[in-house]
Each structure stands twice: as C-alpha cells, then as structure tokens.
Image: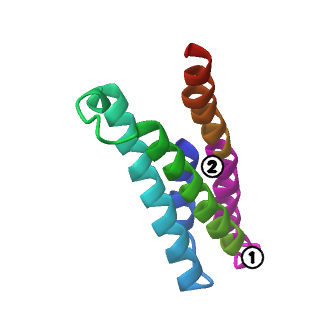
Amino acid sequence: QISLLVGFISVNNSQWTDYSAYSYFQIVTMCDLVMILFFYIIHIFRIYRMLTCVSWPLAEFLHYLIGTILLLIASIVAASKSYNLTGLVAGATFGFLATVLCVLSIWSSYKVSCITQSTSE
C-alpha cells in the first residue's frame, strides 16, 4: 500500500501541531504496512500451505478489519489536528485513501475466501 507509505512520509516530514495525534497516526500506518507485507510474504512463499492450523482467510479478514478501523480513527484525528498545514493535510488525505483501499481489500478477501468456497462445495 503505497498510500500508507506516502501518508507516513508526509506526516513525518511536517511540523507537528499535536505530538500524540501524529505519533498515533505514524504507529497505525507503520503497523498496518508491516502486517500487509507479512501477509504478502505468506502468500508469495505459500507459507499458508505449511501452517494449516491457522485459518488464513479469517486472519487476513480480521487484520484488514481492525487495521481499517484504526486507520480511519487515525486519519480523522490527523485531519482534525492538521490546522491547514500542507504536509499534515496530505498525510490525513492519504490516510483516508488507504482506508478506502483497505475496505476494498476486505471486500475482495471476503469475496475470494467465502463466496468461492461456498460455490465450490
């Protein structure tokens, strides 16, 4: 998710008006980005085939759901504390864009895992 990275960099290189709001935004964006990369690595190297004790579609769904909710909250807080500073507004905007993209990822992972499994039975 490039939008998470751009939002993080925009906020990191700006003057902060509220330390707690933007440190929370940075923590949420980096944790979300790390978890997305974690799931990409699991899918690329097909680790999910070796670890059958974990329901990977459910784990991915819960990750996207929790990450999206936290990202939405962080983006709202960042937008409310930006005070029209360009970098902070850009960071909050990319946070909202990443939220929309995460919602699309939730829908696509639900569609792939649940709908295709129910039709294949």
Quadrant for the C terminus, please.
Answer: top right
The numbered dot on residue 98 is: 2
Residue annotated with mark 1:
80
- The residue under label 2 is which amino acid type? Ala
Task: Tell me the colour scheme of the image.
Answer: rainbow
Q: Position of residue 76 (x, y in %)?
A: 71, 69
User: Could you tell me which residue is drawn at 56 percent across and 75 percent down?
Assistant: 22
The segment highlighted magenta reads 79-102
Q: Is residue 28 left or right of residue 100?
A: left
User: Could you tell me which residue is drawn at 76 percent across and 73 percent down?
Assistant: 84
The disc, 2 or 1, on the residue closer to the chain's N-terminal end is 1
Q: Dot 1: what SS?
A: helix
In the foreground, 83 or 32: 32
Q: Is residue 40 magenta?
A: no
Write down the quadrant of residue 66 in the picture. Answer: bottom right
Write down the quadrant of residue 15 in the picture. Answer: bottom right
Query: In the rendered structure, are the residues bearing label 2 and label 1 in contact, judged by CB atoms less than 8 Å apart?
Result: no
- The residue under label 1 is which amino acid type? Ser
Q: Is residue 36 left or right of residue 15?
A: left
In the foreground, 121 or 26: 121
Label 2 – label 1 distance at C-alpha: 17 Å
Q: Is residue 35 visible?
A: yes
Q: Is residue 114 left or right of residue 104?
A: left
Q: Is residue 95 magenta?
A: yes
The numbered dot on residue 60 is: none
Q: Position of residue 32 (x, y in %)?
A: 47, 55
Q: Dot 2: what SS?
A: helix
Q: Position of residue 81 (x, y in %)?
A: 70, 79
> In the image as oriented, which residue stretches furthest toward the left?
50
> In the image as oriented, which residue stretches furthest toward the top?
120
Most common secondary structure along the magenta stretch? helix
User: Could you tell me which residue is drawn at 54 percent across and 57 percent down?
Assistant: 67
